[in-house]
Amino acid sequence: MWYSRIPMGAKRDIKTADRILDAAEKLVQVRGFNAFSYADVSKAVGIQKASLHHHFATKTDLGVALVERYRRVFLEALAGIESEEDAAVDRLERYIGLYRTVLRKKRMCMCGMLAADVATLPTPMRDSVAVFFAENESWLTRVISAGTSRGELHFAGTPASMAAFIVSSLEGAMLVARGRGEPAHLDDVASLLIANMRPPTPSRSAKAR
Amino acid sequence: MWYSRIPMGAKRDIKTADRILDAAEKLVQVRGFNAFSYADVSKAVGIQKASLHHHFATKTDLGVALVERYRRVFLEALAGIESEEDAAVDRLERYIGLYRTVLRKKRMCMCGMLAADVATLPTPMRDSVAVFFAENESWLTRVISAGTSRGELHFAGTPASMAAFIVSSLEGAMLVARGRGEPAHLDDVASLLIANMRPPTPSRSAKAR
DNA sequence: GTCTATAACGAGATAGAC
DNA sequence: GTCTATCTCGTTATAGAC
């Protein structure tokens, strides 16, 4: 009896919870945490409002689950990049690609969005958002350190400060791209970012002097 | 009769409207457009909710007035910088100072905030936000063009693309600073930004090769 | 121009049947 | 696990007295 009910029930539960998370994630990325409601999620998932509370008792619970899943998925993507690319520039291009993919779906980075909403967020969500940025900078610092020591990158400042700089530039580029209504803005910023980190090519740097 | 009433009435009207705008501006910069209410403004200004509607009939009207005033004040600040500083780097430092001042008050750039809320904004607000960024980039492009032609700046890319890059970096730095709960983040990004735009000093660039 | 009072609606959340 | 029904509160906005 129990052995037939629990696994099935658990499976269904997980699936519905994920569908809720998917819908809520999109809503947060497009509208922000304060501008979506259980009614919106209800419509998107095709389930009644009250049923949502069975999976996520409060909006805070839903929000915390949302950020934690986002962080986990992002970290997995970073690990994938590191295993697939060797050159620092290629790794950075792939990193930028993550942002591009989000913006192409007309969304903002979820944690960038939540950073704007930070004053109104429940504390556990706020903390998790801070960790997201710390994790990003930490990964980038490692990639950049390896790149500089191999002479693949060149810039003023430390790898850690450049890592922080990259996160800010890309988050800002997404934000401004939305504000200007011009998705291509992110591409322009990304190009310039990479261009200014490449080691000087003897033939080209002639123009500067 | 009319000559004594109209000027007085008009004066009082403007003053209250400005107090409302001040309170609402702060609320938008801290919480976002969807996370503040007429009740919040009412409390801050010390006037009843219904009275607010006399000055700004709808929240959309208030929002449009808010962005337009913000743009105007910002443009005046930019004009002031241009008249007080000559060197490109000094002008850029002063420009960055505008962002620093906002963040020190624990606020986000209003248009950066509204860029996050863009999907939920009434169209006239959205348009005005887009113009804010265009105006910023246009001013920066002029400053950077002058700086590069005088040899005060050095970087890969065009003045216009660097202007867009600077706006994105600073908006992103404010956003991430809030998300991380570390106001100093903006200073770090600003330092690196300037450092990577300075022309190469012969003695120091020795380290690179 | 400001007030009190209230309308009309949507939010997050709960109770309890199935 | 999902449903219907309902509660309570906060939201934007209006009516009309002063």
Image (cartoon, coloured by chain):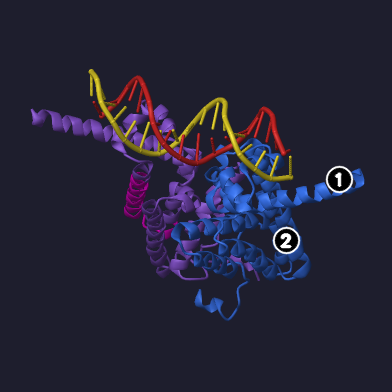
Chain colours: A purple, B blue, C yellow, D red
Residue A185, position in %: x, y? 58, 47
How many marks do you count on the picture? 2
Quadrant the N terminus of chain A occupies: top left
Residue at mark 2 to residue at mark 1: CA–CA distance: 32 Å
Asked whether B53 or B27 is in front, the reply is B53
Q: Where on the picture, by quarter, is residue D14?
A: top right
Quadrant the C terminus of chain A occupies: bottom right
Mark carried by residue B6? 1
Category of crowding for the residue at label 2, using alpha-carbon neighbours closer than 10 angstroms: few (below 14), some (14–19), many (at least 20): some
User: On the picture, is A4 further left or further right than B55?
Assistant: left
Q: Check disc 2 and give the amino acid type.
A: Ala
Q: Where on the picture, by quarter, is residue B62?
A: top right
Looking at the image, can residue A126 be seen? yes
Classified by dominant secondary structure, the portion drawn in magenta counts as helix
Residue A74 within the segment the image draws in magenta: yes
Q: Secondary structure at mark 2?
A: helix
State which tag comes first along the sequence, 2 or 1: 1
Q: What residue did someone put label 2 on?
A: B77
